Amino acid sequence: MASTIGWELYRSFLGVLKEGSLSGAARQLGITQPTVGRHIAALEAELGVVLFTRSPAGLLPTAVAHTLRAHAETMERTAAALERAASAHGDEVRRVVRVSASEVVGVEVLPPIITQLRREHPHLRVELVLTNRLSDLLQLEADIAVRMVRPSQEQLLAQRVGLIEVGLHARDDYLQLQGVPLQMQDLAGHSVIGFDQENAFIRSLAIKGFERSAFAISSDSDLAQLALIRAGAGIGGCQVQLAKRDPRLRRVLPDGFALKLDTWVTMHEDLRNSPRCRVTFDALVQGLQRYVQD
């Protein structure tokens, strides 16, 4: 019975999960609230389970709904990938291309590149996904990804754009008040801005003097860290190319802290003949190469 359930029912199910109400899901999906309600009722009837319970705060997902969420999200990605793959044929540059990039690159570096791309191809729609995890291009979570690590999968097309260097920076007035550290151990007397939760990449760096215990301000958002540095809150890691754009930022301890991130633009080999993916891929490579060389 479950094999006959249409995707539109699961689509409404995901909408309610994300929005917490029938009305919110209807707005997100561009359909009417009664239609969403009918979809949820039909899905519950087909599966023989209760997916949501009502509360003053809205619709609360049941344990079964939480279990189904990952599977429904996989269906959502597959449906989107099918639509993008179907639009890949033909000579025109139009429809949707989905680009994945880290928070900082997506906010600080890509906007002018995407702006110029759409001026040249106004019928192209760009979905920009900001995430610091590696999007699974083999599962088509994105069409194109900007990665700070060399891809290892053979099915991916990859173009290296160069090294993006990250160094320690602080605003000039902070350094005037607190002094300039001359050695990594001097950071113990400063307000250091850094990560909150360690991950495998951070552990691999193992930079003495730049550990979680030494941080005065911690955040797992790279954008938040960058904003704090720009606000003069302390010393933290910032891309050297970005810091050059801000006349108030000063680099400190360049010999003690210099991360060089090998940067690549990648896409699935099945998309090599897609005009929308090809022009986007080339624009990202060229734009990021200019950024790296600044």
Image: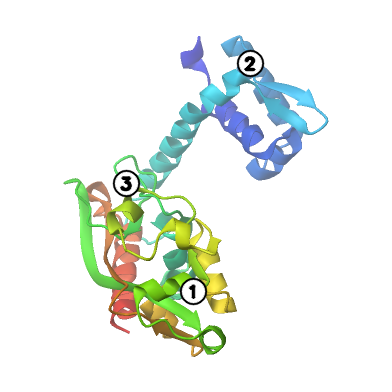
Q: Which corner quadrant of the image does residue 38 belong to? A: top right
> Which residue appears at 38% of the width and 49% of the height?
199
Rendering coords of residue 80 (x, y %): 45, 42
Pointers 1 and 3 in contact (C-beta within 8 Å): no
Q: Amino acid at mark 1?
A: Gly
Q: Relative to residue 222, is residue 139 depicted above or below?
A: above
Q: CA distance from mark 1 to mark 3?
A: 44 Å
Q: Relative to residue 239, is residue 75 depicted above or below?
A: above
User: Quick one: SS at disc 2?
Assistant: helix
User: Quick one: SS at disc 3?
Assistant: loop
Name the residue carrying label 1.
189
Q: Quadrant of the C terminus?
A: bottom left
> Which residue appears at 48% of the width and 36% of the height?
76
Q: Which sits earlier in the primary sequence, circle 2 or circle 3?
A: 2
Q: CA distance from mark 2 to mark 3?
A: 33 Å
**Farthest residue, direction right:** 56
Q: Which sits earlier in the primary sequence, circle 2 or circle 1?
A: 2
Q: Relative to residue 183, is residue 59 depicted above or below?
A: above
Callout 3: few (<14), some (14-19), or many (20+) C-alpha neighbours within 10 Å? some
